[in-house]
Amino acid sequence: MSIEVRNITKTFGTFRALDDVSLTVADGELVALLGPSGSGKTTLLRVIAGLEQPDPGSGAILFHDEDVADKHVSERRVGFVFQHYALFRHMTVFENVAFGLRVRPRSRRPPEAEIRRRVQELLELVQLEAFADRYPHQLSGGQRQRVALARALPVEPRVLLLDEPFGALDAKVRKELRAWLRRLHEEIRLTSVFVTHDQDEALEVADRVVITNGGRIEQVGTPDEVFHHPATEFVMDFLGDVNAFHGRVHAGTVQFDTLELPFPYSRQRIAGDARVFVRPYDVTIDTMAGDLPALEAQVTRVHSAGPIVRVELRTSAGQRLVSEISQERFRTMGLETGGRVYVRPRHIRVFADGD
Amino acid sequence: MTRRATTESPFTRRVLIGTALAFLTLCLFLPLVLVFTYAFGEGVGAYLASFGDPDTRAAIRLTLLTAAIAVPANTLFGVAAAWGIAKFDFRGKSVLITLIDLPFAISPVIAGLVFVLLFGARGWFGPWLMEHDVRILFAVPGIVLATTFVTFPFVARELIPLMQAQGTEEEQSALTLGASGWQTFRRVTLPNIKWALVYGVILCNARAMGEFGAVSVVSGKIRGSTTTVPLHIEILFNDYQLTASFAVASLLAFLALVTLAVKSLVEGRTAEVGGAGGPREMEGGR
């Protein structure tokens, strides 16, 4: 079931949480809403679910071309998984999962044996069949999250919405559940949207990533697209570490620090002041000056405890930047704090200097 | 054995505990014992005979009737008010919370006088009521109204903090799963507040049956017709019918003991259930 959000605006008092947002999620897709807190991602999810009403007069929400904007949350048939699980604390795991079936009107309620069978099936799907008689407070966080997921499924939701599904879990459990959610999605192929502020989570799990900022959508694309071709400065900055320089674009070149590099991307129509970004792993370090243009810099600090080595540098013009190189390269160069080196940005991204 | 820095000396401890015990004995335990001593002072026969008096029976019936109306009414109001306050945001919410506390803040006698001002012969609605031959003051409706007013906050006060702490996510979950508003209330909200509700109801009931001040102002004390148990005890006492007076009083004392027993039982339950559902629940999984 596809989801289409058309020109939705939502304000809380004077705060504009969603500002004319439009988004399409294809049938069977797993989409991540990624952004900092207050960027509107959770509000968008809750508006899709019907837990929040968009501002009167603002656009439409369609499930498979059917307008659901006027439908009550209980009639939209969405599976919603809350960040803090919101399990029914006085019910066993089994009864939690059975809830959606038990509250159906008598005419559409399956017989008890059928309910048992379906709940059992879902508990197996989330690998919790041994915990059917436990109460939520007897489970770990990861187990509760899986119960919350299983609870959303027996009513055959048209879409699955997850609000920071792993936000309340510790790092190790998060990673496990991430991979598990992806596998589950492959298995059930339910159109799903999840909210997260963790870019690794979004890039690893989702088919497409929607990056939100200040109530607007900055960019929508596959993880590769948004990571390697960020459309805006915000996206570039949000998806990983960056080194930022002030620069100038002029006559097919971009100048920053003491460098002048060719900049033939005339289609971006940037001229004058600009911001130049380089990812740390795109900054190469050499101990000797080569043929290619490079910046002279001094090593100010080295973090070598890890799979890669982070080298903090200061250029001769006083600009600080970070480079990430392999352990092997680090050892062959024999870098030391205070040493003089030549750094070269292998790949840069240039954005017009926004105000 | 060394003493911890935060522990008082054994002497200070004994003095403090002793003072508290002496105070409790004098002001609570002794009067309670005396009530039963006087009640059974002339033997079990005289004690039971006190309840044969038609006026006493009428007083007991009236008290039961009053509680049977006031307690369910306040349970309903209390749940509705707590639900509204805890689960929704609206303007004037803090004013409403303050209003709910009003009956606790003002003297019951004043509460009774307010009803006299409203429904008395020279009150706001008095003339109209007389014209239509409706009796509120010095009759059962007045007693029920005064009791309801005085016992209004008990249920709401118990529920509001609990429901606020529990938040609304479980209810939202239920709605997304297709439950109707009523199903959500009955299957999710109500079970979560069950024990706090029982607690509020028994306190409300104890006060409804024991209320003296407000009822005394509006009742008119017509024997056998508008006297509740507490009023009847006073009348008997003033008539020097000590055995009868204390026999009836023993009923209220007994009610107090039962209330305390139920209360401590329920407190155990709420600690268990509330604790399991409250913030401590999160400890294991984070």
Image (cartoon, coloured by chain):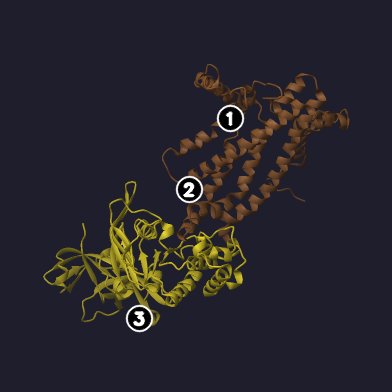
**Which x, y percent locates residue B96?**
48, 36
Numbered label attached to residue B87: 2
* Rendered-image quadrant of the C terminus of chain A: bottom left
Secondary structure at numbered mark 2: helix
Subunit of label 2:
B
Disc 3 crowd, CA 10 A, few/some/many (<14, 14-19, 20+): few
Q: Is residue A318 visible?
A: no
Q: Nearer the viewer, residue B141 or A55?
A: B141
Disc 2 crowd, CA 10 A, few/some/many (<14, 14-19, 20+): some
**Which x, y percent locates residue A126?**
52, 72
For marks 1 and 3, give the CA distance: 91 Å
Q: Which chain is brown?
A: B
Secondary structure at numbered mark 3: helix
* Rendered-image quadrant of the N terminus of chain A: bottom left
Q: Which residue is mark 3?
A: A333
The amino acid on which the numbered mark 3 sits, given as a three-letter code, is Met
Secondary structure at numbered mark 1: helix
**Which x, y percent locates residue A217?**
29, 62
Subunit of label 3:
A
Q: Nearer the viewer, mark 3 or mark 2?
A: 2
The amino acid on which the numbered mark 2 sits, given as a three-letter code, is Lys
Return the disc, 2 or 1, that comes first in the chain's sequence: 2
For marks 2 and 1, give the CA distance: 28 Å
The amino acid on which the numbered mark 1 sits, given as a three-letter code, is Leu
Q: Is residue B160 above or below residue A281?
A: above
Colour of chain A in the rendered structure image:
yellow
Dot 1 and dot 3 residues touching (CB under 8 Å): no
Q: Is residue A40 visible?
A: yes
Numbered label attached to residue B145: 1
